[in-house]
Image (cartoon, rainbow, N blue to C red):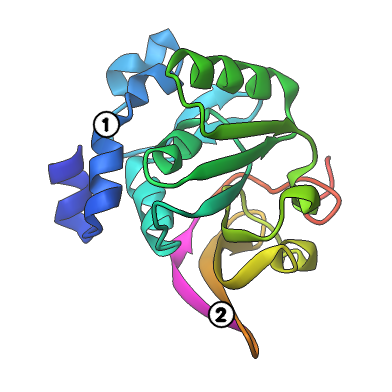
Amino acid sequence: MVAEQLQARGIHDAAVLAAMGRVPRHLFVSEALMDQAYGDYPLPIGYQQTISQPQIVAEMTQAIAASSEDRVLEIGTGSGYQAAVLAEMVFRVYTIERLQPLYMKARRLFDALKYHNIVTRYSDGTTGWKSEAPFDAILVTAGGPSVPEILLSQLAEGGRLVMPVGSADVQQLVRITRSSSGFESEILCSCRFVKLVGENGWREE
């Protein structure tokens, strides 16, 4: 997966490649899908959610340019795979999930794999985690109509936020960097994610 899918398609960050080589992706999907876990496509994890394809996980992780001392906020724990990749690279990961069954399953898996630097929360991720802010990076693993202002306010100076932004069907992966003078935004690529549902995202149908 690392050589054929990631390096071959432009993932060059050695820390990202090493982290994704260490995390046992097959443990983050159902037993029935384990033989497909390392394929270059997303897989269902229940509750109309997915585990993103390895390529997009790598793209998003590389885009936040994390260091080993960083504190990173993830919005949308899902399967827990993205948080585990981050945990291999940074000081601490704070991850929020709004669907309780996914939250509970991911928490048990983090404990089993001894990811003691992952802090979990069952809540609406679109409001962030104010009591633990500011964060060196924020990674949003669902697509929203716009970047919530409250998340931008929780970025440290020099911090990076990466999020899919657009319609419910197709988004652009956006990176926003906070500086002393404000925020700078750039588009990285097109993508398609499940909806970011919450107070500052899409409303539940």
Q: Which residue is mark 1?
A: 22
Q: Position of residue 161 (x, y in %)?
A: 57, 64
Which corner quadrant holds the N terminus? top left
- Bin the neighbour count of mark 1 within 10 Å (Cα to Cα): few under 14, some 14-19, many 20 and up: few
Amino acid type, callout 2: Ser
Which corner quadrant holds the C terminus? top right
Q: Which residue is mark 2?
A: 185
Depicted 163 relative to depicted 177: above or below = above
Magenta stretch: give its range. 183-191
Who comes first in sequence, dot 1 or dot 2?
A: 1
Res 64 → quadrant: bottom left
Res 67 → quadrant: bottom left
Amino acid type, callout 1: Arg
Depicted 172 relative to depicted 178: above or below = above
Q: Position of residue 189 (x, y in %)?
A: 42, 67
Residue drawn at 34 percent across, 41 percent down? 54
For numbered disc 2, what is the local secondary structure?
strand
Looking at the image, which is closer to me, 203 or 63? Answer: 63
User: What is the residue that sits farthest to the bottom in this orientation?
Assistant: 181
For numbered disc 1, what is the local secondary structure?
helix
In the drawing, does residue 95 fall left or right of residue 61?
right
Residue drawn at 69 percent across, 57 percent down? 144
Looking at the image, which is closer to me, 138 or 27? Answer: 138
User: What is the residue that sits farthest to the front in this orientation?
Assistant: 69
Depicted 67 relative to depicted 180: above or below = above
Total count of labels:
2
Q: Tag on residue 146?
A: none
Main SS category, magenta section: strand
Res 98 → quadrant: top right
| Distance of label 1 from label 2 (alpha carbons) | 31 Å
Q: Position of residue 122 (x, y in %)?
A: 75, 30
